Image (cartoon, rainbow, N blue to C red):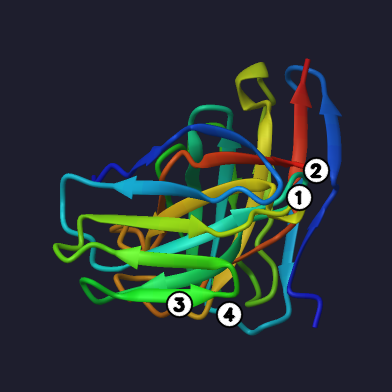
């Protein structure tokens, strides 16, 4: 079973700062999904990356997929309190049709 | 569309009690699954179903039963609750499972269960 390592585990920043969180594996990803989970809610899909080297943008969020498809990053520009939440990477590749999740990065953006 | 709904939102059980966590989706998705989320452990698959009448075990199935009599509903039953089952439970659905990248999983809002 592939293990997804996310870093950092926790991140607390001030509004307006930039940040990057990472998702790494020792194996090649078939593809990778990023989810955001707000407190008291279920995860919600942000983006799926498929091709090595791919870059996708979602407003202030930029997602990169490593050339070798073994790592991915999420960069947030000018973070806002509304960005607070748990950011999870997941590979849709479990043998049981499930998602394999990393443990997440818990982001807190203070006003 | 309501998406994926779960009831109850919160539940407290005593050790040994049984209960059923309800999950329903209105998107006509074939694939449904149950995860539990624990601090430091991430989301772990309990049971899943690839269609009505078909269920199978996930990573942590012990102490839980499921059934899938309709496409819409996928209840999770705790047979005899234990403190180790204290967790947040999420139901999810998608168009299909398998090693395909394009299928987004839709999650319900979760049930926070405490077993004393």
Q: Where is residue A5 in the image (x, y as percent from the top left)?
A: 33, 40
Q: Which of marks 1 and 4 is in front?
A: 1
Q: Which residue: 75% across, 55% down?
A: A82
Chain under callout 3 = B
Is residue B57 found left or right of B78 in the rendered image?
A: left
Q: Is mark 2 on a helix, strand or loop?
A: loop
- On the image, the x and y values in percent for residue A39 come to 75, 44
Q: Which of A8 and A41 is in front in this view?
A: A8
For the residues beneath circles 1 and 4, the answer to whether they share a chain is no
Q: Name the residue under label 3.
A: B103
The residue that mark 2 highlights is A111
In this orientation, which residue lies closer to the viewer: B10 or A88? A88
Query: Compared with residue B106, is residue A7 higher up or lower down, i.e. above or below?
Result: above
Indicate which disc residue A81 carries. Answer: 1
**Viewer-nearest of labels 3 and 2?**
2
Disc 1 is attached to a residue of which chain?
Answer: A
Q: Distance between the residues labelled 3 and 4?
A: 11 Å
Residue B29, label in figure:
4
In front: label 4 or label 2: 2
Within 10 Å of the Cα at label 1, are there few (<14), some (14-19), or many (20+) other Cα atoms? some
Query: What chain does mark 4 sit on?
Result: B
Disc 3 to disc 4: CB gap under 8 Å: no
Horizontal side of residue A15 vs B62, given as left or right: right
């Amino acid at each position: 079973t592939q293990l997804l390592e996310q870093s950092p585990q926790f991140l607390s920043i001030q509004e307006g700062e930039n940040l990057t969180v990472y998702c790494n594996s020792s194996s090649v990803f078939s593809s990778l999904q990023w989810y955001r989970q707000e407190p008291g809610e279920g995860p919600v899909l942000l983006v799926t990356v498929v091709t090595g080297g791919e870059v996708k943008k979602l407003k202030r969020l930029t997602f990169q997929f490593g050339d070798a498809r073994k790592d991915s990053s999420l960069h947030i520009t000018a973070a806002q309190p509304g960005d607070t939440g748990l950011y999870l990477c997941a590979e849709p590749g479990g043998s049981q049709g499930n998602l394999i999740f990393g443990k997440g990065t818990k982001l807190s953006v203070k006003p | 569309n309501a998406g994926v709904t779960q009831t109850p939102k919160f539940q407290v059980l005593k050790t040994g009690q049984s209960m059923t966590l309800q999950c329903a989706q209105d998107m006509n998705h074939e694939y449904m699954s149950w995860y539990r989320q624990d601090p430091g452990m991430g989301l772990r698959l309990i049971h899943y179903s690839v269609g009505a009448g078909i269920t199978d075990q996930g990573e942590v199935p012990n102490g839980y039963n499921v059934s899938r009599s309709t496409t819409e509903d996928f209840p999770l039953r705790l047979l005899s609750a234990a403190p180790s089952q204290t967790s947040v439970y999420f139901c999810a659905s998608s168009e299909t499972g398998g090693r395909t990248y394009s299928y987004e999983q839709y999650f319900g809002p979760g049930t926070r269960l405490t077993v004393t």
